[in-house]
Image (cartoon, grey):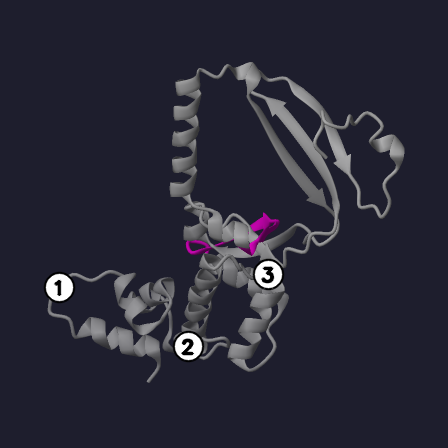
Amino acid sequence: ISPIEDVITAIKSCESGDDFTYTEVPNQFGVERSMLSRRHKGKTSSFEAKAISQKKPSLEQELELVRYIGDLSKRGLPPTREMIQNFASAMAKEDVSESWVTHNVNNYEDQLTAKWTTGMDRVRHQADSEDKYKLYLDLLHSEIDEYQVEPQHMYNMDEKGFLIGVTSRSKRIFSKHLWQQGQVPASLQDGSREWVTVLASICADRSALPPALIYQGKTLQSSWVEDVKVGKHNV
């Protein structure tokens, strides 16, 4: 007997007046809600239901794959379309097409979403915490108030490296719930740092310093440090 027939039997065995939903019941048996609704209301033939229950990957495998994508999203490792295609092929024990991935993501659009993402180092992912941000900002504002620091005396400097050791922008499949909660903004990368660095500095009064570029080099030219004064500057 197919899973869908098991669900139909379970529904028919309910006492008259018992409450049930087309969401709770199929989750217990691993079948698709919309297909169960049509089958129970007589809109899907038993032949069609059998064909659906025997499709590869099966409905149970599709649901397991959705759960697995959710687990990967929590770990900061949302899969690419190619990875999902490989997962599904391994579960079905036969190759599935690229169009199957598109159909499956659309079929579970309430749980999955496709977004473009860039890489994030593992250590940054581990340090990404709302509580830590709040603690830092509370401390920052208390120091500003205590010492009456004016906007023109506050600068924010940041560096950005590019090209070498950085993954390119790619489209990944995420758990939709985790994406909407802002818990998986990026995928992880190996963290290799061999690149050109740009330094940017912006003042709180909306002014900015000219950006600086740092290149990898093997020698030091005297012209680079001719303005450095011994005893006055630290190098």
Q: Secondary structure at mark 2?
A: helix
Q: Secondary structure at mark 3?
A: loop
User: Mark 2, mark 3: which one is toward the viewer?
Assistant: 3
Q: Give percent across and percent down for residue 170.
A: 64, 53
CA neighbours of label 1 inside 10 A, class few (<14), some (14 to 19), many (20+): few
Indicate the amino acid at tag 3.
Thr
Q: Give percent across and percent down for residue 142.
A: 39, 25
Is residue 223 left or right of 21 when viewed as pictured?
right
Q: CA distance from mark 2 to mark 1?
A: 27 Å
Q: Quadrant of residue 172?
A: bottom right
Secondary structure mostly taken by the magenta-highlighted segment of the chain: strand
Q: Are marks 2 and 3 in contact (CB under 8 Å)?
A: no
Residues shaded magenta = 109-122
225 in magenta: no
Q: Secondary structure at mark 1?
A: loop
- The C terminus is located in which quarter? top right
Q: Give percent across and percent down for residue 43.
A: 35, 66
Indicate the amino acid at tag 1.
Asp
Is residue 41 left or right of 208 when viewed as pictured?
left
Which residue bears the numbered disc 3?
80
Query: Which residue is pictured at 54% across the width and 73% down the height?
Result: 88
Query: Which residue is pictured at 11% across the width and 66% down the height?
Result: 16
- The N terminus is located in which quarter? bottom left
110 in magenta: yes
Q: Earlier in the sequence, mark 2 or mark 3?
A: 2
Which residue bears the numbered disc 1?
18
17 or 66: which is nearer to us?
66
Is residue 37 left or right of 226 when viewed as pictured?
left
Q: CA distance from mark 2 to mark 3?
A: 27 Å
Labelled disc at residue 53: 2
149 or 2: which is nearer to us?
149
Q: Are marks 3 and 1 in contact (CB under 8 Å)?
A: no
